[in-house]
Image (tube, rainbow, N blue to C red):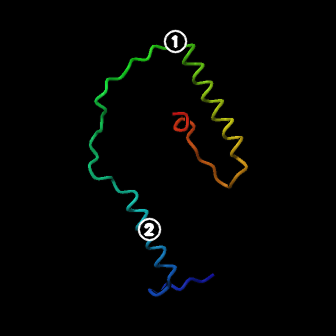
Amino acid sequence: MKINMGSKNPAWFLIGIGLAGLLAACAAPVGTGEIKSDKERQPVDASADRITELVSGNSQFAFDLFHELRGKGDNLFYSPYSIWL
């Protein structure tokens, strides 16, 4: 397939718009200061066994979710941690 690189070719216009959008999406947001809650953090009192149980459950959830979703498309990306929250 030969692409005409003339300025009136709509393919180059669309590629240019796409690249401009990509660059805009990668720009640093305005006002990148740190945002903190005014609420005090509550200490977590968990034994090593409870933490191990939590990690094991999260891992099992991630693998189960992957096996459920893996046949539904070409690419698969998800964050089990963000879903769990």
Q: Which amino acid does label 1 sit on?
A: Ser
Q: In which quarter of the image is the N terminus?
A: bottom right
- Residue nearer the viewer, 77 or 40: 40
Side of 71 relative to 51 (left or right): right
Write the residue at 66% across / 39% down: 65
Picture quarter containing residue 79?
Answer: top right
In the image, residue 81 lies at what x, y percent? 54, 35
Q: Residues within 10 Å of mark 2 (few under 14, many from 20)?
A: few
Q: Mark 1 points at which residue?
A: 47
Considering only vertical position in the picture, is 85 above or below 73? above
Q: Which amino acid does label 2 sit on?
A: Leu
Picture quarter containing residue 54?
Answer: top right
Mark nearer the viewer, 2 or 1: 1
Q: Residue furthest front?
A: 39
Q: What element carries label 1?
A: loop
In the image, residue 85 lies at what x, y percent? 51, 33
Q: How crowded is mark 1: few (under 14 residues within 10 Å), some or many (20 or more)?
A: few
Side of 3 relative to 43 (left or right): right
In the image, residue 28 lies at what x, y percent? 33, 53
Write the residue at 62% across / 24% down: 56
Picture quarter containing residue 78?
Answer: top right
Write the residue at 63% across / 49% down: 76
Q: Name the residue under label 2.
A: 19
* Mark 2 and mark 1 residues within 8 Å of each other at the beta carbon: no
- Residue nearer the viewer, 12 or 79: 79
Q: Is mark 2 on a helix, strand or loop?
A: helix
In the image, residue 47 lies at what x, y percent? 51, 12
Dot 2 or dot 1: first in sequence order is: 2
